[in-house]
């Protein structure tokens, strides 16, 4: 009887931790995609060029990439919950101001502020989720990734609906209110989201109360980040981000290569994204049933790379295109939970914030690289090269797994 009662109690306790964090990750991806569906409306209102407006995204990614690692150190020092709350609040405030103030300079500045808020999510989220019992952590990581994907997926339709009634400024304010609503469970679940590891570190630091001890801690932290396994993880994140940059050019690349109608090309992109989300959930279920996370990641990357390359050669037929695009998205998604488990395997328990912050900055670095590379290929009239380049990034990723993590995934 005790066992029967303890199972739902344990799952409820886990839900109290996981649900608010997944909600925060949902809003982070919602905010990242927000400008895309509203691009034309914002541009027309301010009378600026596409390049001018793209400065907003550049500011967001540069700030996120530069400050995510320092914020990871902050997570390990003062605790993940307070940093996560500050990140959500900063993002909500930034987009509220962007919607309320009629100034293009302020608009760009608020994207930089939102980029600062964005630095909180990965180091804080993974630091909190890593306290999940080992037998469940792979699946919990998959829920976290899935919530982000859903946030990006629902953003366009909801934002455009609000825009149709209240304009783009109303959409930005509405998104800010959604962020404030997500703050509520983070504030309420204080005990469930308490960060005992960071508290112990803080007390130990106060007990030592020496500048030398803090210097040694910082030096040890930097040495950890510059170790081969962590750097390989960083390259893993950069390469997968560059690889995923193909999604933004998929529709135009298919049109240029095969003359694919827009409806079919967008259908292929939708299939890719939906199967990516499904792959994440299946990958999470797989992650709790095996310790061979490097093998899962390597196989998934290989299959995804092959499927992506085949789109560049045989994607002219509708049925073939849909199948290959779906497989590409599915296998990439399947690797995500194993990727997170690999990062955790090479990270000391008191360093989750800084390590996940550091390696996750690879997403922002990749997001700065990918548009330029793919755009140049389209400008030079070689659309097939986009698929081959994305596939090559996937295959290169296998090297980071094989050389960096085999034999370490047992931890």
Image (cartoon, rainbow, N blue to C red):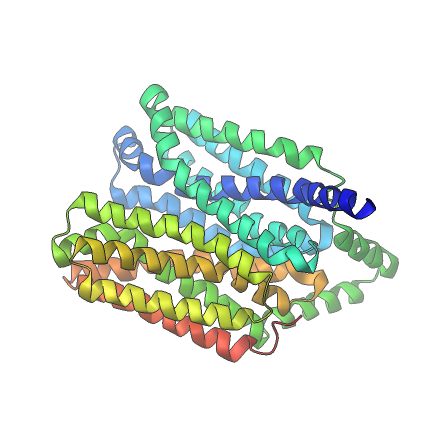
Residue furthest left as drawn: 259
Q: Residue at x 50, y 39 (%)?
A: 27
Q: Is residue 82 visible?
A: no
Q: Quadrant of residue 31?
A: top left
| x and y percentages locating residue 9 in the rendered image | 75, 42
Q: Nearer the viewer, residue 361 or 292?
A: 292
* 328 displayed left or right of 344: left
Q: How many marks?
A: 0
Depicted 400 relative to depicted 254: above or below: below
Residue at position x 36%, y 36% from top?
156
Which residue: 72% across, 54% down? 77
Viewer-closest of 11 and 208: 11
The picture quadrant where one finds residue 126 is bottom right
Asked whether, in this view, residue 57 is left or right of residue 16, the answer is left
44 left or right of 274? left
Whole-percent x and y of residue 79? 71, 49
| x and y percentages locating residue 117 in the rendered image | 54, 43
Does residue 330 appear in this view?
yes
Location of residue 296 in the rendering, given as x and y in whole percent from the top left corner: 49, 68
Q: Quadrant of the N terminus?
A: top right
Q: Quadrant of the C terminus?
A: bottom right
Q: Residue placed farthest to the right in the image?
A: 207
Asked where in the image residue 368 lies, by quadrant, the reply is bottom left
Query: Residue at the front extreme?
Result: 1
Q: Residue at x 15, y 47 (%)?
A: 261
């Amino acid at each position: 009887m005790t066992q029967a009662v303890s199972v739902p109690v344990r799952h409820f306790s886990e839900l109290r931790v996981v649900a608010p964090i997944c909600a925060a990750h949902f809003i982070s991806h919602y905010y990242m995609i927000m400008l895309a569906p509203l691009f034309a409306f914002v541009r027309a209102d301010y009378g600026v060029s596409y390049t001018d407006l793209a400065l907003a995204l550049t500011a967001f990614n540069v700030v996120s990439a530069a400050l995510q690692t320092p914020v990871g150190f902050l997570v390990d020092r003062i605790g993940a919950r307070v940093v996560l709350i500050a990140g959500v609040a900063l993002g909500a405030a930034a987009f509220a101001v962007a919607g309320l103030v009629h100034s293009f300079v302020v608009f760009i500045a608020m994207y930089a502020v939102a980029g600062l808020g964005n630095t909180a999510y990965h180091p804080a989220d993974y630091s909190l989720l890593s306290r999940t019992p080992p037998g469940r952590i792979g699946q919990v990581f998959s829920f976290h990734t899935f919530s982000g994907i859903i946030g990006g997926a629902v953003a366009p339709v909801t934002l455009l609906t609000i825009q149709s009634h209240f304009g783009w400024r109303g959409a930005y304010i509405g998104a800010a209110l959604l962020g404030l609503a997500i703050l509520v469970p983070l504030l309420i679940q204080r005990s469930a989201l308490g960060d005992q590891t960071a508290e112990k570190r803080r007390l130990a630091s106060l007990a030592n109360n020496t500048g030398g001890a803090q210097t040694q801690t910082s030096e040890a932290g930097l040495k950890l980040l510059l170790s081969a396994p962590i750097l390989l993880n960083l390259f893993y994140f950069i390469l997968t981000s560059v690889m995923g940059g193909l999604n933004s050019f998929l529709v135009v690349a298919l049109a240029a290569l095969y003359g694919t109608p827009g409806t079919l090309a967008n259908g292929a992109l939708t299939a890719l994204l939906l199967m990516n989300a499904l792959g994440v959930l299946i990958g999470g279920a797989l992650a709790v049933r095996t310790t061979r996370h490097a093998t899962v990641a390597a196989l998934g990357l290989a299959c995804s790379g092959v499927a992506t390359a085949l789109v560049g050669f045989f994607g002219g037929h509708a049925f073939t295109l849909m199948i290959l695009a779906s497989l590409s998205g599915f296998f990439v998604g399947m690797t995500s939970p194993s990727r997170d488990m690999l990062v955790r395997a090479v990270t000391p328990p008191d360093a989750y914030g800084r390590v996940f912050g550091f390696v996750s900055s690879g997403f922002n670095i990749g997001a700065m690289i990918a548009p330029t590379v793919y755009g140049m290929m389209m400008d030079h009239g070689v659309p097939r090269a986009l698929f081959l380049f994305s596939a090559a990034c996937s295959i290169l990723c296998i090297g980071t797994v094989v050389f960096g993590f085999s034999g370490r995934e047992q931890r």
